[in-house]
Amino acid sequence: MSHAQNLGKGSKSAQLTKYMIFGNPVLFTLLAARALDLFIDATFSMTPHPFYQVLIIMVHDCQTDLYVPVIYALMTHKCEDLYYTSLKPLF
């Protein structure tokens, strides 16, 4: 899934933001669990250009008792609006 949007519409600080989300559809079933433990982290040092960060969402798998990375999101900015827009369709 990928998307582009304009943040701060009508202002001088308007920025075009983009995100791309990757994941294994088989692991998406872990997101449907009734009791869901999430671990969300971001990294900046290994992010490919033109993106600013890689957001990683891990879910606790009760069968293996491990946190499994389910979603990787490449993002061009670090802002609350972009987090909300990119993660809302997933949950």
Image (cartoon, rainbow, N blue to C red):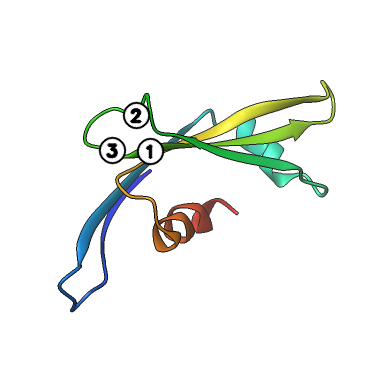
Q: Residue furthest top?
A: 64
Place of residue 45 in the rendered image (x, y in percent of width and height, measured from the top left): 38, 27
| Left or right: 11 in relation to 82 | left
Q: Is residue 85 above or below residue 10?
A: above
Q: Nearer the viewer, residue 52 or 32?
A: 52
Q: CA distance from mark 2 to mark 3?
A: 6 Å
Q: CA distance from mark 1 to mark 2?
A: 5 Å
Place of residue 62 in the rendered image (x, y in percent of width and height, measured from the top left): 84, 30
The dot on residue 53 is 1
Q: CA distance from mark 1 to mark 3?
A: 6 Å
Instruction: Kindly indicate whether the residue at mark 2 contacts the one at mark 1 (C-beta within 8 angstroms).
Output: yes
Q: Residues within 10 Å of mark 2 (few under 14, many from 20)?
A: some
Q: Nearer the viewer, residue 80 or 32?
A: 80
Quarter of the image containing the C terminus? bottom right
Mark toward the start of the polypeptide (1 vs 2): 2
| Left or right: 84 in relation to 32 | left
Q: Residues within 10 Å of mark 1 (few under 14, many from 20)?
A: many
Instruction: Kindly indicate whether the residue at mark 3 contacts the one at mark 2 (C-beta within 8 angstroms).
Output: yes
Place of residue 90 in the rendered image (x, y in percent of width and height, measured from the top left): 55, 50
**Secondary element at image label 1:** strand
Instruction: Kindly indicate whether the residue at mark 3 contacts the one at mark 1 (C-beta within 8 angstroms).
Output: yes
Mark 2 is on which residue type? Thr
- Tag 2 residue: 47
Quarter of the image containing the N terminus? top left
Q: Residue furthest left?
A: 12
Q: Quadrant of residue 79?
A: bottom left
- Tag 3 residue: 51
Mark 3 is on which residue type? Phe
Task: Identify the residue at horizontal 41%, vertical 63% (top origin).
Answer: 81
Task: Identify the residue at horizontal 53%, vertical 28% (top origin).
Answer: 24
Place of residue 17 in the rendered image (x, y in percent of width and height, measured from the top left): 27, 54
